[in-house]
Amino acid sequence: MTDRLRTKRLLTIWAGIVCTALLLGYAAFQAEALFLGPRLSIDSPLSGTSTSTSLIVVRGTAHNISHLTLNGAKIFTDEEGVFAEKVLLSYGYNRVTVEATDRFGRKATESLQLMYK
């Protein structure tokens, strides 16, 4: 076998290895959402907060979801997964629950305990 043929064969093998490694890396990166499930966080208000106004805005982020609810009512996110929804509190103790569900049925839940005085 000539040196030229040997070099060509080695380059073909290494190109195949590099392409396979890139493909597997990309697949692992995209499969992250499958393994992590839904991710949910509420940024404001903080749980345990007392307020003197009955209307508050619950803000947060949700990723890897197919459905998002606030106290059982469906809400929506923007392209970055950010949501902001108004909630009317009743006088006294209030519990606000945000639940995220992914396409495989896995759930993530965050609850707030708020006091309206």
Image (cartoon, grey):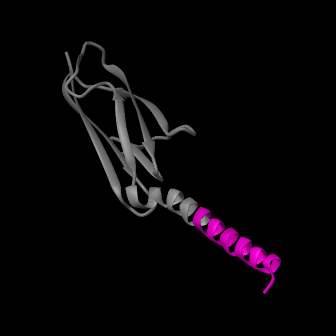
Chief secondary structure of the magenta portion: helix
Kindly identify the residue that appears in the image at 25 percent across and 25 percent down: 90
- What is the quadrant of residue 43 in the picture? top left
First to last magenta residue range? 1-22
| Magenta span includes 12 | yes
The image position of residue 80, as x and y in percent, is 54, 38
In the image: residue 12, left or right of residue 80:
right
Residue 68 position (above or below residue 48): below
Quarter the N terminus occupies: bottom right
Q: Is residue 43 magenta?
A: no
Of residues 30 and 102, the one nearer the viewer is 30
- Quarter-wise, where is residue 54 in the image? top left
The residue lying furthest to the bottom in this view is 1
Q: Is residue 112 above or below residue 115?
A: below
Q: Report x, y in % for residue 36.
A: 39, 55
In-image side of 44 versus 16 (left or right): left
Counting labels gives 0
**In this view, 21 is above or below 110:** below
Picture coordinates of residue 8, whole percent (x, y): 78, 75
Identify the residue at image location x=39%, y=44%.
69
